[in-house]
Amino acid sequence: MRTLPFYQVDVFTDRPFAGNPLAVFPDADGLTAAQMQAIASEMNLSETTFVTAAEGDGDARVRIFTPSQELPFAGHPSIGTACQLVRLGLVRADEPVTRVVLELDVGPTLVEVDVVGGVPVAATVHQGAPVFGDPVPRGEIAAVLCLDEGEIDPAFEPRPVGTGLTYTIIPLVSQRALAHVQLDLDFLPAFERDHAEVYPCAFTGRDDPWIEARGLFPFAGIPEDPATGSAAGPLAAFMARHGRLVPGERRVVLQGQHIARPSRLVVSVGGTRDAVEDVRVGGSVQPVLRGEMDLPD
């Protein structure tokens, strides 16, 4: 029997029992993909990460699993894992910012960790330049979200956007409409096949720098995600393209309120409105627990 240490952190929050929980296994060398998937299913969190020796010039190789599948990239696992590597002394803590390069399935991914008094407190993951898909018919969006077409914000054309993973960004007219979203599970598989997973959102006010979103991914084993960094990046790129996020400006994406896990994701982009690049998603990280798992032979 092998005993594996693990750590759990809450990401996109500065207090325990909020944000998006993440389990990190920092000593995963020798585990098979099947074992990793079984452990992630047992942890039953949005994601679990497994750290192994770097294969290239990065600081560590990291694999990310939901309870039902492996992901090539995800936001809160990248942020939480990078902070935990610094906390464990596996990456030297430089103040005020420690640069950590994670070797993910999408390639080397830079995470900048904010360090105070030698302790990591927050981090920002750098995502790729966005790829925009074609607009999605409003009738399909209304059907998959179980809303009226009038509840889809007429100022925007919903479309898939990818900065590592791809999501259909869907601005709605109000937070009330966002609260009423219910997925049509019969139609959802065809919608995701033709477009991408849905990420509905709503601005909280005309001049307010906040926006609320919901991550609903039942077929990934996540009925509702407390925070989705890999979707907040595409949302930031979408807002920048529509002039609602100026390059260099920061906005806060709120998520998780509907499941009592409030999260704050800070997004920004580089480049210009017509050529968005260096999409960034960041937030605080709070350690919660540590333990050991007995892995049968």
Image: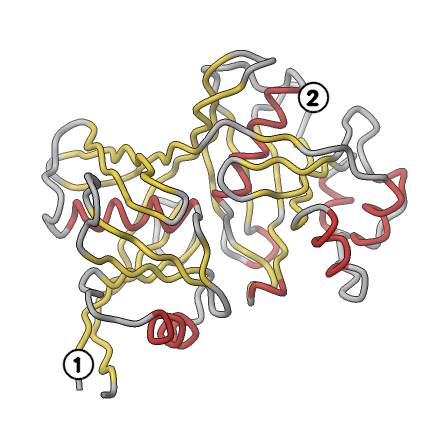
Which sits earlier in the primary sequence, circle 2 or circle 1?
1
Res 206 label? 2
Question: What residue is drawn where x is 40% and y is 71%?
Answer: 37
Quadrant of residue 207 within the rendered picture: top right
Side of 25 relative to 229 (left or right): left
- Secondary structure at numbered mark 2: loop
Foreground pick, 13 / 197 = 197
Res 259 label? none
Q: Amino acid at mark 1?
A: Arg
Question: What residue is drawn where x is 67% and y is 47%?
Answer: 196
Query: Percent position (x, y) of residue 168?
Result: 68, 42
Query: Percent position (x, y) of residue 74?
Result: 44, 48
The residue carrying mark 1 is 2
Question: What residue is drawn where x is 30% and y is 72%?
Answer: 32
Say if mark 2 contacts mark 1, CB within 8 Å: no
Quadrant of residue 205 within the rendered picture: top right
Report the mark closest to the observer, 2 or 1: 1
Q: Is the residue marked by circle 2 packed among few (<14), some (14-19), or many (20+) residues within 10 Å? A: few
